[in-house]
Structures are given as structure tokens and as C-alpha cells.
Amino acid sequence: RDGSETRATAATGMNHQSSRSHAVFTIHVSVESGGDKNPPDRIRAKMHLVDLAGSERAKRTGAEGDRLREGIQINKGLLAL
């Protein structure tokens, strides 16, 4: 919830509330099993959910100025992934 409140969004020509930032959510799960006489078995897992900022073609969004530069940086970040 805290991350969603600080997440950057802005309007483009393609989307009135386009995400302008990436978000990573990590879920940790741990399960223990075993009886009174046996040592517990522990299973741990970690799952990453990734929501990437929108990758839109600059020509189609009609972006200019800061919004255009922001879109270029988003696309560079996606290319690195």
C-alpha cells in the first residue's frame, strides 16, 4: 500500500494514468512441519512480482518535453532488463 501511494503516474496520449515508475513486490513464504519427536522441516520460498513502467512509442503518445525525456529513460530501463 505504501508503494502505491508514492508511485509516479502521468497522462500520455495513449493512457490517462500511465505508470512512470517500476515496482517490485517480494513475497516471502516459510512453512515448518514435523512432529514432537522429529526435527522440523523448513521450506522457504521467495517470489518477486514486477510491474514495469509503461513502454510506449513516443510518436504515439504525443509526449513532449519532460514527459518525452521520462519515456526515453523508462525505455532505456526496460532495454537493460
Image: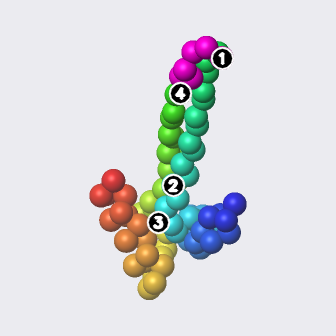
Looking at the rendered structure, the kind of residue marked 3 is: Arg
Q: In terms of sequence position, does the residue under pointer 1 or pointer 4 come before the other?
A: 1
Residue 42: mark in rendering: 4
Mark number for residue 36?
Answer: 1
Q: Residues within 10 Å of mark 4 (few under 14, many from 20)?
A: few
User: Foreground mark, 1 or 4?
Assistant: 1
* Residue farthest left in this picture: 80
Viewport quadrant of the N terminus: bottom right
> Which is more N-terminal, label 3 or label 2?
2
Q: Is residue 80 above or below residue 68?
A: above
Quadrant of the rendered structure where residue 68 is? bottom left
| In this picture, residue 14 sits left or right of residue 76 | right
CA gap between label 3 and label 4 equals: 51 Å
- Residue named by callout 3: 60
Residue 40 vs 68, above or below: the answer is above
Give the number of the mark in front: 3 or 1. Answer: 1
The residue indicated by pointer 2 is 24
Q: Which portion, as a residue range, is magenta?
A: 36-41
Q: Amino acid at mark 4?
A: Arg
Which SS class for mark 2? strand
